[in-house]
Amino acid sequence: MRIVFMGTPEFAVPSLEMLVNEGYEVVAVVTQPDKPKGRGNKMCAPPVKEFAILHGIEVLQPNKIKTDEFVEEIKALKPDLLVTAAYGKILSKELLDVPPKGCINVHGSLLPAYRGAAPINWAVINGEKTTGITTMFTDVGLDTGDMLLKKEINIEPDMTVGELHDKMAILGAEVLKDTLIELKNGVLKRQPQDDALSSYAPIMTKELGLIDWNKSAQEIHNLVRGTDPWPGAYTFLNGERIRIWRTSLVPDKQIDTNAEAGIIVEVGCDGILVKCGDGCILVKEIQRDSSKRMTVDCYIRGHQIDAGEKFGTK
């Protein structure tokens, strides 16, 4: 089966690797253009491109895909199927009509929940206990196509989105493998999505990481987990931005305080205890803009931070 694979970040690599290992004929990879990265703004290739080059697969990096020229370029490859995984753009009907077997997408949620760009982040931020992978036939809508196969995965109480992402990338490859086997055997079943049950997972921005200490300890804990490693949760102390990377919940019965939200209640080697709108949270790993992320135990050896000070939004 001739396949054109469209994907960009680390999430897509295990799916592409599975196609190669299982002997599918990947005739080209389409991925986003290289982008500047880091303090030096050095141009960096997407992870999918790096994998493709290592395996001698042709790489296409169009700035725009909704053009006649790009559709003709794909037609010339004569693919039987398009496979997409976190490519980053919506495909046109003209492009979807090219391969006779259509386009199968690997999506990081249990559709129709969390359609959109950041389903894994929002599942953690919203405190979901489970999420999963859904394969679907892509249509012109935003993750609205008919569903094919699903597999669930648990979200552990302290799991970060980075940890969950890595597990889901591998799970995505497994579900895609099963999907293609059923497609090949002619037993793949389509299930339309119920739009009334859908929800939306918008793209993450840096501003989403700002902590509102008036929220509950559980909500703040979920935000910290759901933004690690990017964009990262943050707060301000005496006008300086402080990133918060690790937290843990503290049983209410162990805390007796009427302090305002954001007030630092205690500082110790095990963490910084902070009052939230509901309950308290223990901050265990932090980072100043000018230094590396570190445990609170290491941080307080070189930096002054006292009970009674207040974390805020500026």
Image: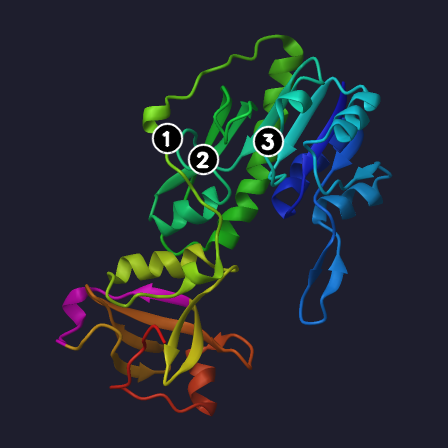
In the figure, 161 relative to 293: above or below? above
Residue stretch rendered in magenta on the structure? 246-258
Residue 17: which quarter of the image? top right
Closer to the N terminus: mark 1 or mark 2?
2
Given the image, on which type of amino acid does mark 3 rest? Glu
Residue at (45%, 35%) from the top-left corner? 115
For the residues marked 3 and 2, what is the alpha-carbon distance in whole angstroms?
20 Å
Which structural element holds mark 1? Answer: loop
Look at mark 2 in the image and give the residue it sits on. 115
Look at mark 3 in the image and give the residue it sits on. 174
- Give the quarter of the figure containing the C terminus: bottom left
Which structural element holds mark 2? Answer: loop
Which structural element holds mark 3? Answer: helix
Horizontal arrangement in the rendering, residue 264 relative to residue 185 (left or right): left
In the figure, 291 relative to 3: above or below? below
Q: Residue furthest right?
A: 56
Closer to the N terminus: mark 3 or mark 1?
3
- Where is residue 278 drawn, in percent x and y? 19, 63
Given the image, on which type of amino acid does mark 2 rest? Arg
Q: Nearer the viewer, residue 208 or 81?
A: 208
Look at mark 1 in the image and give the residue it sits on. 198
